[in-house]
Amino acid sequence: MADVSDPKINDAYDEVRSNKSDTNWVLIDYESDRSDKLVVTQTGTGGLAELQDVLDPSRASYAYVRVTYSNDKESQREKFILVTWIGSGCKVMRKAKISVHAADVKAVLRAYSIDVAAREKDDLKEEPIIVRLRKAGGASYDGV
């Protein structure tokens, strides 16, 4: 079981969801290689591109991201995604625990449209994620 009791996780989650904040992502990491305690390590305002730059290939992390995209010429939508990052150099025991820990994380970061499992930074390219968000969003009037 992952320890998600750090109040900063809820604070960062609320900040990403807030319309009054420019913060659009939060990165949550394990406190150490041997710990199951999760802590907020970074937040940012640069979206998926900025998040890709800070992900560590030797770690497993979780991220919560606000994605803004145009649905048509007249409107914009904001949707939220949950990212489960397992870097290529992540230790085997940590990888084994991710599926169990992800349920604990989802209980805290509970409102999101899609869950993105990322193994490489390219898995977080914005355009394919927006396509997935449009499909998950229901009615689409632009043929997607």
Image (cartoon, rainbow, N blue to C red):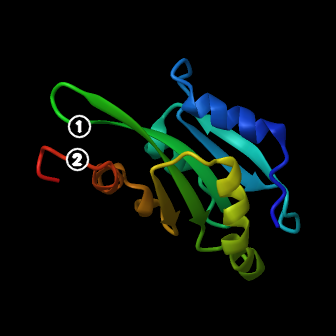
Residue at x-position 41% and y-position 61%: 122
User: Mark 1 packing: few (<14 Cα in 10 Å), some, or many (20+)?
Assistant: some
Foreground of the two, 70 or 60: 70
Left/right of residue 48 with respect to residue 134 in the rendered view: right
Q: Earlier in the sequence, mark 1 or mark 2?
A: 1
Residue at x-position 12% and y-position 45%: 142
Give the x, y percent position of residue 2.
Answer: 81, 62
Give the x, y percent position of residue 107.
Answer: 69, 54
Q: Is residue 59 visible?
A: no
Viewer-nearest of discs 1 and 2: 2
Q: Amino acid at mark 2?
A: Ala
Image position of 129 with respect to 20: above or below:
below
Left/right of residue 97 with respect to residue 13 in the rendered view: right
Mark 2 lies on a secondary structure that is loop
Q: Amino acid at mark 1?
A: Asn
The extreme top residue here reads 20
Residue at x-position 73% and y-position 54%: 29
Judging by the rendered image, the residue that carries numbered circle 2 is: 139
Mark 1 lies on a secondary structure that is loop
Judging by the rendered image, the residue that carries numbered circle 1 is: 71
Distance from disc 1 to disc 2, alpha carbons, whole Å, reads 11 Å
User: Mark 2 packing: few (<14 Cα in 10 Å), some, or many (20+)?
Assistant: few
Give the x, y percent position of residue 9.
Answer: 74, 41
Image position of 120 with respect to 52: above or below:
below
Left/right of residue 62 with respect to residue 127 in the rendered view: right
Give the x, y percent position of residue 102.
Answer: 67, 64
Left/right of residue 33 with respect to residue 79 in the rendered view: right
